[in-house]
Image (cartoon, grey):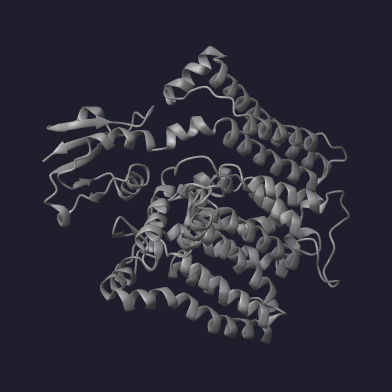
């Protein structure tokens, strides 16, 4: 679908890149890290807790962790994750099943961004936009973890595509924009919905969008999107008015909190620090586009993604929260800008781009292979010692299917980077293949070792025999730990608050062993973790 466009579209220069390469790379990119490991901190613990509460306790309307409402995100991602977990429960553990929601949303996000690139830039550009998005470093980890931010990312991708259509296809664009805004409200908050509408209204500043079709699109979007956006808050109000009031006052605006108390600003400079690597290679290619088209910045193909980027940048500057996941929507407009002049990269620049990716990903891939040898064969000894230091309970194992996956990924990457007649599109494909390679290698060769470091299962298995049976237990370790204690050990812990003051046992977490509390009856920590220390206290 990314390769078809109506005849009116401009056509990119002929290229040897084939559509099947994009489809194959997308398929390979989507799956590493989805299966075969426990919920990882920080976000997957929350998702596992909410999904388990939906499936076992029936808390489908209100995201809940062990009877505690968890309202940091609206429930769309949790609903989809719980649906996949339920469908796959006969063959997959809950963590693997719920994680299928991420490739589900990622497939649509790539499709929507590709279609936006096609409609804004012309024929064959859609696949370049999708390929560049696959190669963005910021999406590499978030695109393979269970996180509601992926549903929000997908919603912003649909916003971009719908607004690219609104100049000339009012009914279709309005339907899509309405679905997108409803999706943002149901996956994140009213803040993201508001950002989408701000972008749509600011487009009237540009002549290309001052059309009856754009007005029609917004009218249709309001009709479609408003009921979708308000469906969950109104249902929440009907079931639990007090909780709904709390959500409107403290959670409805996401990172800005709510209408009853609004917060602004964080320590300035955080997003400037992460942007150079998070948006790599999109931002250098976007700058190239702006330079090449500096005399035509008023073209619709640039106006929409530039406005999109600026509105999101202002939001992140004003946000009181600094977090990498908030920068994910940035990648959507940058991918379109980066693809616009990809074919005009000079051969020397394309070769430099390709060489940088070849050296970077080649060295990282070689290190991952060397690390796998050290983990399983003890050579080099120094590297094996460092690996054992971080995961002392790791046991050498040769997983033949994972080894074959790693070998196949390496061979495909070697084939890709040795092709001749290098051009901008091939360089971007090679970059995306390099990103896919290192993630596939890490998620196959190193997965058991990484899982030991990021999983709480060993700690909770130690805690379970010491857990009290004659009294309830509270903890200050947070809702993520409470969710994982139930997931891994069937333990019911409660937040350390006045509601459970009668509990005689408390599990406390300290960041230094020297802060060990008195009267502890059990202590433990995750293997290789020297930052978190847990103590069970009888009060």
At 57% from the left edge and 37% from the top edge, which residue is drawn?
443
- Observer-nearest of 38 and 125: 38
Residue at image location 66% in from the left, 83% down from the top: 171
Whole-percent x and y of residue 538?
A: 13, 38
Q: Is residue 511 left or right of residue 35?
A: left
Residue plotted at (67% across, 37% down): 437
Quadrant position of the C terminus in the picture: top left
Label total for image = 0
Q: Quadrant of the N terminus?
A: bottom right
Residue 202 appears in the picture as rendered: no
Which residue is depicted at the point 84% across and 37% down? 419
Image coords of residue 513 (percent x, y) = 25, 28
Could you say which is closer to the camera, residue 496 or residue 192?
496
**Residue 510 in the figure: left or right of residue 488:** left
Along the line of sight, the residue nearer the viewer: 410 or 130: 410
Residue 32 or residue 335, whichever sits in front: 32
Q: Is residue 525 above or below residue 94?
A: above
Q: Residue furthest front?
A: 90
Let me know if residue 68 appears in the view.
Answer: yes
Instruction: Measuring from the top left, give residue 288's x and y in whole percent.
Output: 72, 51
Does 184 sit left or right of 130 as displayed?
left
Question: Residue 133: x and y, percent?
Answer: 65, 52
């Amino acid at each position: 679908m990314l390769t078809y466009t109506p005849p009116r579209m401009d056509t990119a220069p002929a290229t040897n890149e084939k559509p099947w390469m994009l489809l194959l790379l997308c398929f390979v990119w989507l799956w590493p890290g989805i299966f075969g490991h426990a919920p990882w901190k920080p976000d997957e613990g929350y998702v596992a807790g909410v999904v388990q509460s939906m499936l076992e306790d029936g808390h489908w309307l209100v995201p809940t962790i062990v009877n505690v409402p968890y309202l940091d995100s609206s429930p769309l991602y949790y609903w989809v994750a719980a649906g996949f977990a339920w469908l796959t429960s006969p063959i997959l553990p809950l963590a693997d099943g719920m994680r299928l929601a991420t490739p589900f949303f990622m497939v649509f996000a790539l499709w929507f961004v590709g279609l936006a690139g096609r409609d804004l830039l012309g024929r064959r550009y859609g696949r370049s936009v999708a390929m560049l998005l696959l190669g963005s470093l910021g999406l590499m980890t978030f695109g393979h973890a269970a996180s509601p931010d992926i549903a929000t990312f997908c919603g912003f991708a649909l916003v971009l595509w719908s607004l690219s259509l609104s100049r000339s296809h009012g009914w279709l664009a309005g339907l899509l924009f309405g679905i997108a805004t409803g999706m943002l409200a149901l996956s994140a908050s009213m803040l993201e919905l508001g950002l989408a509408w701000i972008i749509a209204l600011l487009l009237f500043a540009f002549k290309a969008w001052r059309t009856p079709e754009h007005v029609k699109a917004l009218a249709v979007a309001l009709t479609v999107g408003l009921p979708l956006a308000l469906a969950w808050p109104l249902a929440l109000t009907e079931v639990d008015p007090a909780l709904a009031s709390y959500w409107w006052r403290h959670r409805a605006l996401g990172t800005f909190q709510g209408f009853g108390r609004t917060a602004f600003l964080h320590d300035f400079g955080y997003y400037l620090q992460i942007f150079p690597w998070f948006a790599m290679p999109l931002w250098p290619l976007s700058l190239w586009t702006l330079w090449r088209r500096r005399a035509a910045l008023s073209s619709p193909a640039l106006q929409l993604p530039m406005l999109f980027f600026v509105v999101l940048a202002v939001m992140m500057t004003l946000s009181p929260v600094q977090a990498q996941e908030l920068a994910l929507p940035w990648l959507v407009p940058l991918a379109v800008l980066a693809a616009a002049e990809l074919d005009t990269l000079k051969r020397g620049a394309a070769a430099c781009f390709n060489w940088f990716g070849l050296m970077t990903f080649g060295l990282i891939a070689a290190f991952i292979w060397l690390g796998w040898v050290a983990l399983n064969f003890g050579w080099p000894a120094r590297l094996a010692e460092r690996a054992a230091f971080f995961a002392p309970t790791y046991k050498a194992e040769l997983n033949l299917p994972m080894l074959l996956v790693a070998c196949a990924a390496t061979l495909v990457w070697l084939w890709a980077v040795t092709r001749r007649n290098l051009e901008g599109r091939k360089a971007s494909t090679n970059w995306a293949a390099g990103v896919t390679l290192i993630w596939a290698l890490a998620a196959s060769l190193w997965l058991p070792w990484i899982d030991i470091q990021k999983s709480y299962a060993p700690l909770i298995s130690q805690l379970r025999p010491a857990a009290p049976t004659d009294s309830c237990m509270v903890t200050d370790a947070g809702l993520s730990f409470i969710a994982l204690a139930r997931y891994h050990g069937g333990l019911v812990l409660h937040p350390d608050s006045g509601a459970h003051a009668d509990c005689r046992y408390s599990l406390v977490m300290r960041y230094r062993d020297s802060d060990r509390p008195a009267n502890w009856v059990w202590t433990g920590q995750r293997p290789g973790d020297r930052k978190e220390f847990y103590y069970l206290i009888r009060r």
